[in-house]
Amino acid sequence: MSIVVTGATGHLGRHVVEQLLDKVPAERITAVVRDAAKAADFAARGVKLAVADYNAPETFDGLFAAGDKVLLVSGNEFDKGRVQQHKVVIDAAQAAGVALLAYTSAPGSLTAALADDHRATEEVLLASGLPYTLLRNGWYHENYTENLAPVLEHGAVVQAAGDGRVSSAARADYAAAAVAVLTGEGHENATYELGGDEAWGFAEYAAELSRQTGKEIVYNPVSPEAFAGILAGAGLPGPLAAILAGVDASAEKGELVVSSGDLSRLIGRPTTPLAEAVTAALKG
Ligand SMILES: NC(=O)c1ccc[n+]([C@@H]2O[C@H](COP(=O)([O-])OP(=O)(O)OC[C@H]3O[C@@H](n4cnc5c(N)ncnc54)[C@H](OP(=O)(O)O)[C@@H]3O)[C@@H](O)[C@H]2O)c1
């Protein structure tokens, strides 16, 4: 019986494998990757690698075994039909008879188009009859803190979220929740609404950036249309820019506030404050 993690060479997946290595023997962990070379460090530490692609169902043949616990990390290829991609993994897991399939979803409160693939994948998973865990991950701190260059250059945080608040947490926090589910008991058929302990607004975020950089950084709220235009102007494909602007519109409505307390309860500690992620990003 293995713990199998897809998307293991992505940002979240790497945190999950690293944290699993602290808790279970390496030979019990299988990292599903598209490019084994990107996971050479894991292999060197004894993690098993399986090379597979959500776009090639045959690559998942025989990958899972009965009794495995699987983390399906949602894909990032918005133009390739993510629901069908995720179904490939769910079908293979069902055929093998895995003990649990945990899926990294989106908050139940999120109505933005970004959530559509997640809701549809949840339906496929529930229809499969597999024991499941829905890890409805809120927003990552890093969505903001890893994109500081234009903010520092212009002295402005530009978003379309109005006075909306966001309960973000560090990727490492969401990874810790996944690890708790994969290594713990009693998470079958549970849905967790995961988010940071503290919700914050973009004016506060700008103030925190000012405090830590010593420069004046303001929040400049714009309309979703203007924001989509700015993102497209910065090189994002138009459809993705529209999706991200839609997330901001949802944030303005309060849809990225998660107040369940599920994340800190699952990980057994407070979530990482946004200010810490800012500090880490400014150092990096
Ligand atoms: N909650 C949030 O704030 C937030 C923000 C952004 C994204 N997300 C979602 O959460 C997921 C994990 O976040 P992340 O930061 O780790 O994203 P990421 O770094 O972009 O990682 C995505 C992972 O999915 C894998 N993947 C993509 N297409 C695949 C395919 N066709 N077959 C097999 N694997 C495939 C990638 O493989 P490679 O390593 O080979 O590229 C990568 O490991 C994202 O994919 C996205 O669905 C959530």
Image: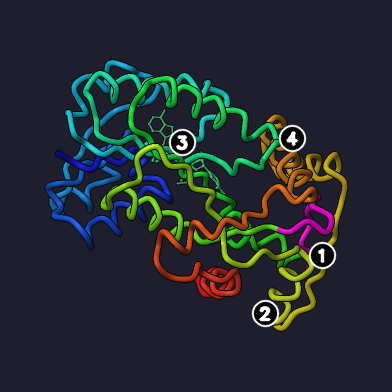
Q: CA distance from mark 4 to mark 3?
A: 20 Å
> What residue span does the magenta drawing correspond to?
155-165
Badge 3: few (under 14), some or many (20 or more) residues near its Cα, within 10 Å? many
Closer to the observer: label 2 or label 1? 1
In the rendered view, does 184 fall on the left or right side of 219? left
* Residue occupied by mark 4: 242
Crowd rating for badge 1 (residues with CA inside 10 Å; few <14, some 14–19, many 20+) = some
Ligand 1 within 8 Å of the CB at mark 3: yes
Mark 4 surroundings: few (<14), some (14-19) or many (≥20) residues within 10 A? many
CA distance separating discs 1 and 4: 21 Å
Please, what secondary structure does the residue beneath circle 3 have? Answer: loop
Question: Which residue is labeled 3 in the image?
Answer: 74
Q: Quadrant of residue 164?
A: bottom right
Residue 5 position in % (x across, y down): 30, 41
In this view, the mark in front (4 or 2): 4
Q: Amino acid at mark 1?
A: Tyr
Q: Which residue is more in the foreground, 281 or 165? A: 165
Circle 2 is placed at which residue position?
213
Q: Residue furthest front?
A: 186
